[in-house]
């Protein structure tokens, strides 16, 4: 008597069992991912306001539609000041976020900052000590170009003990500096390195011991500099009132 063959039946049964297992696994994964996020853990050297912005971006993205990790990362980076964003789902209701902000080198205008790479970013809620950063502004130059100018000028001034607090570019591309004691130095747009050297020479020869009396140093000349004293400014103000 021939033995019955159960090969096809067994193969079909095994296939159906495999399909059932895959379906169950898919359902389990879906339920896992579909669990509402209850905790957003944020790592990084951020201010409290920055953390709140990141958390709000994550929650809003997840609530708006079916979103994945890539969507969350894009939402965080759209804030404009984050770097090296990493997002991972640790548990059914937990998301870990790691965010890095580039080191800030200077303020840019009234509300932005320039990173060490020369990029303009926002940085909400910075501690008060960050306000001691030098202030830059540009009209014709980019933030990176302004950073380069600042680096050269501040280094040269530091050689003689002066601190550059503010560097601003005028509408015609001239550079104006504000030093400690609020002394204004006007270099113009041409030969700024040479003009700065004249300022340094006058400072070392005649002004080092009386900078508190100086209001402005104007080096926008072919040679030499013009010094305006604060006494002169006070006299002009008095005459104007009379």
Image (cartoon, rainbow, N blue to C red):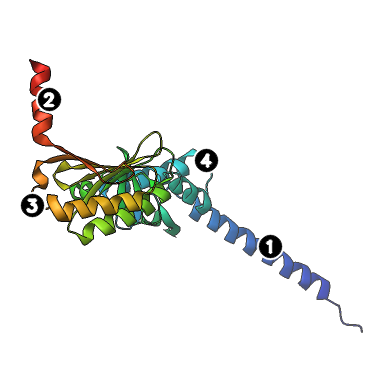
- x, y (%) of residue 185? 24, 43
Mark 2 or mark 4: which comes first in sequence?
4
Residue pictured at 13% horizontal, 44% vertical = 181
Q: Vertically, is 102 above or below 184?
A: below
Q: Is residue 176 left or right of residue 78?
A: left
Q: CA distance from mark 1 to mark 2?
A: 92 Å
Q: Secondary structure at mark 3?
A: loop
Q: Residues within 10 Å of mark 3 (few under 14, many from 20)?
A: few
Label whose residue precedes the other's in the sequence (1 or 2): 1
Give the crowd class for mark 2: few <14, some 14-19, many >=20 residues within 10 Å. few
Tell me which numbered mark, 1 or 4, is placed earlier along the sequence.
Answer: 1
In x, y percent, where is residue 149? 36, 51
| Residue 49 percent across, percent down from the top left | 28, 44
Are dots 1 and 2 in contact, CB under 8 Å?
A: no
Residue 205 vs residue 142, the one in the foreground = 205
Name the residue carrying label 4: 65
Residue drawn where x is 65% and y is 61% of the image = 20
Secondary structure of the residue carrying numbered label 1: helix
Q: Which residue is mark 1?
A: 19
Q: Name which of mark 4 and mark 3 comes first in the sequence.
A: 4
The residue singled out by tag 2 in the image is 236
In the rendered image, the residue lying farthest to the bottom is: 1
């Amino acid at each position: 008597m021939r033995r019955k063959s159960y090969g096809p039946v067994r193969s079909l049964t095994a296939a159906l069992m495999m399909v059932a297992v895959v379906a169950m696994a898919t359902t389990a994964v879906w339920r896992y991912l579909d669990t509402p996020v209850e905790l957003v853990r944020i790592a990084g050297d951020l201010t409290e306001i920055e953390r709140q912005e990141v958390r709000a971006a994550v929650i809003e993205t997840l609530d708006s539609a079916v979103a994945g990790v890539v969507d969350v990362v894009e939402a965080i980076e759209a804030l404009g000041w984050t770097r090296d964003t990493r997002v991972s789902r640790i548990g059914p209701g937990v998301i870990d976020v790691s965010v890095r902000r580039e080191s800030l080198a200077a303020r840019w205008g009234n509300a932005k900052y320039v990173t060490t790479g020369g990029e303009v970013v926002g940085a909400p809620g910075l501690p008060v000590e960050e306000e001691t950063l030098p202030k830059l502004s540009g009209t014709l130059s980019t933030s990176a170009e302004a950073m380069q100018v600042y680096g050269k000028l501040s280094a040269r001034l530091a050689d003689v003990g002066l601190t550059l607090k503010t560097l601003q570019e005028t509408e015609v591309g001239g550079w104006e500096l504000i030093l400690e004691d609020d002394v204004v130095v006007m270099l113009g747009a041409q030969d700024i390195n040479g003009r700065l050297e004249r300022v340094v020479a006058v400072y070392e020869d005649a002004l080092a011991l009386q900078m508190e009396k100086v209001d402005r140093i104007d080096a926008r000349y072919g040679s030499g500099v013009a010094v305006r004293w604060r006494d002169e400014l006070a006299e002009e103000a008095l005459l104007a009132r009379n």
